Image: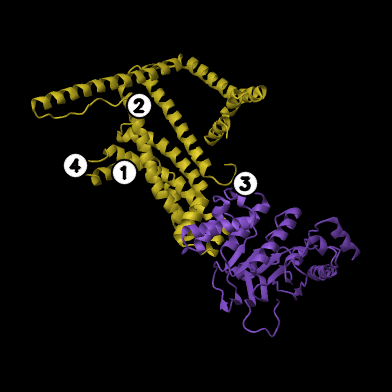
Amino acid sequence: MSVKQRVIRGLELGGLELFVPLVRLVAREEPGEQLRALARALGVPALALLAFLGIWSAAASRIEASIGSVPGPVAVWDAARGLVADHLAERAKQREFEERMAAAKAAAAAEGRPFRERRYAGSPTYFDQIATSLETVFAGFLLASLVAVPLGIVCGTSSTLYAAMNPLIQIMKPVSPLAWLPIVMILVSSLYTTSDPLFPKSFVSSSITVALCSLWPTLVNTAVGVASIDKDHLNVARVLKLPWKTRLRRIVVPASLPYIFTGLRLSLGVGWMVLIAAEMLSQNPGLGKFVWDMFQNGSSDTLSRILVAVFTIGLIGFALDRTMVALQRIVSHDAHA
Amino acid sequence: MTRTPDAAGPPFLELRGVAKSFGHGARRTSVLRDVDLALDEGELVAIVGFSGSGKTTLVSLIAGLLAPDAGTIRLRGAPVRGPGPDRGVVFQSYALLPWLSVLGNVQLAVDAVHADWPRGRRREHAQRYVELVGLGHAAKKRPRELSGGMRQRVAVARALAMDPAMLLLDEPLGALDALTRASLQDEIERIFRAERKTVVLVTNDVDEALRLADRIVPLRPGPGATLGPSFEVKLERPRDRAALNHDITFKKLRNEVTGYLLELASQRSGGTPGGGPPLPPLRPLDLRHVDTRRSA
C-alpha cells in the first residue's frame, strides 16, 4: 500500500473522510475534482463556522452581564492563551522548586543532616484538570464496561434473564447523574475509609457516578448483539460441539463485537457528559470543578474562561467519539470495514 | 453400491417414521411425516424437492440440530442424539464466520474436532483441506472478500476437515449462478470420489442430483411432506457434463424424475401441469436443455 492509500485508510477509519480529497489533492490526483470535493466538504462547514463566530461576536458586544460584558471570540481566544501561559508559568515554578529541593537534599546529604522531602504543592493548571477529567471518565467507563459487557452477554444468551433485567434497565437508564451522585458520595465516604487512600474520594465518587450512568447503552447493545447472532453460526458451534468457553471466545464475542462497540461508543459519550456535572458537585479536580470554581470566582474573565472550558469539553468529546468510531470500524467484520 | 433388501447388518444411516411439526395448537403445521430412508456407507443420495417442502428441516433432523417429534434416526445403528462432528454439515447459507479467514474457519473446525492432535498436525490438516478445494491462494482472505463459489468451497472444506462419518449438504449450490454451479458440481464430484464419503445432498435441481447422486429420492411437497420412491442413477463416473447431455439413460431419468415432481405439483394445486401450478425451480444449464425438454 502506498503512503497515500495508508493515509486515506487511516482517515476513513477515524471517520475523517472529509479530508480525503485534501490527501488526493496533495498527491495530484484529478486536482479539479478534488478541489470541488474539498470545497463541498470543507468550504461549507468553514463558512458556517465563520458565520457562527460573526453572530457570536456581534451578539456578545450587546449583552451586558452582572460581571462584565459577554466575551466574544477574541476574548475567549485570549482567555485560552492565558490558561496556557498560566500552565507554563506553573510548570516553571514547579521545576524551580524541584531544583531547589534537589540542591537542599544534596547539601543535607553532604553534611549528614536528616532531610525531609516535601512535594510541590502548587494548584493544578487547566491542563492538569483536563488530565484528571480524562482519567476519571476512563476509570468510570472501564468500570461500566467491565460490568455491562459480561452482564449483557449473559442477558443476550438467556431470554429469561433479559426479561428479568429489562424493567430494571428501563427504570435505571433515564436517571440523571445528579440523582446518583449524593447516594454515591455518602456510600463512598462511609465505606471507602482507609487512612492512605489510593484514589481521592472525589475521584472515586465521580467515576462510580459516570459508571452508573454510562452502563446502560453497553448493556443493552451487548444483549441485543448476542441475541441477534446468526443462528447458523451457533449451529456451527453445535455441530463442532464447542465447549462453552470456546463458543464464547470464538463465536459469541466476535459476532457481537460490532454491537458491543456501538454500545461502548454511546456509553463513553454519556460518561463524558455526566462527568462534568459529577465533578462540579463532588469537587473532583477536573474540568467540572474548573467551571464551578470560575463560577464561584465571579471575576471579569469568568465567562471567557468558562467558554474556553465549554469548547474544550466539546472538542474532547468529539475526539473521544471519533476514537470509538475508529475502534468500531476496526472490529466490525461485516459491511465495509 | 445401493442397498438391497437382503443386505446384512443395519444400514449406515437409517430414518424410520420420522415426523416433525412446528408451532402449537391450531397453528401447528406438520412439515415432515413418515419419512423412511436408508443409506449405505459410501452412498450419495440426493433428496430433490420444491422450495419450502421441508428439505432443510430434514437435513437439520439428520444433523441433530432439531429433534424429531416421532420416529428414530440411527447412524451406524446408534440413535442420533443432538449434533456432532461425525455428521459434517454444509449449510445453505454456508455459515462461514466472517471474522475468521478462510484457513481460520477450517482451523476452528479442526481444532474443535481434533483437540488431541499437536498444533502442527492440526494446522497441516486444515491447510490440506483448504488446498483440496483449490483455495490455497486465498487462505488468508476473509469470507466477505470471496465470491459465492469460493465461500461455498470453504464451507465444503470445513465440513470435510472434520473427518465426518457422513456429510449433509443443504442446497449447497443453491445461491450460485449457473456457470459457477456447473464448475462446482465437477469439483464436488471429484472430491467426493476421492474421499468416498456417505452423503445426503438436498437440492431443488434435478440435473445437479443426476450429476452427483447414486440415488435420487424425491420429497413430496408439504405440509406433511414425505419421501417418494427412489430413482437409481446408474451412470458411469466420472460423469462428464457434455457427454451426459446426450446420454439416453440420463435423459430418460431426468424425464422420469421431473415428470414425477411435476405430477406432485399438479396434484397439490389440483390443476393441470402447464396451467397455473408452480413449476419446479429447474435451472437449465444451457439452451439445449430447454430444447430437449420441449421436444421430449
Q: Nearer the viewer, mark 2 or mark 1?
A: 2
Figure chain in yellow:
A
Circle 4 sits on which residue? A195
Residue B31, above or below A327: below
The answer to whether tags 2 and 3 share a subunit is no
- A292 sits to left or right of A228: left
- B110 sits to left or right of B223: left
Viewer can see residue A228: no
* Dots 1, 3 in contact, CB < 8 A: no
Quarter the C terminus of chain B occupies: bottom right
Residue at 41% across, 39% down: A271
- C-alpha distance separating marks 2 and 1: 27 Å
The quarter of the picture where residue A332 lies is top right
Figure chain in purple:
B
Callout 3: SS: helix
The amino acid type found where label 3 is placed reads Glu
Q: Nearer the viewer, mark 1 or mark 4?
A: 4
The answer to whether tags 1 and 3 share a subunit is no
Circle 2 sits on which residue? A127
Foreground residue among B273 and B203: B203
Q: Could you classify mark 2 by the number of other residues whose Cα lies within 10 Å: few (under 14), some (14-19), or many (20 or more)?
A: some
Res. A194 mark: none
- C-alpha distance separating marks 3 and 4: 59 Å
Foreground residue among A65 and B286: B286
Callout 2: SS: helix
Circle 1 sits on which residue? A184
Residue A33 at what x, y percent from top left? 67, 24
Residue A231, above or below B36: above
The answer to whether tags 2 and 1 share a subunit is yes
Q: Chain of mark 3?
A: B
The answer to whether tags 3 and 4 share a subunit is no
Callout 1: SS: helix
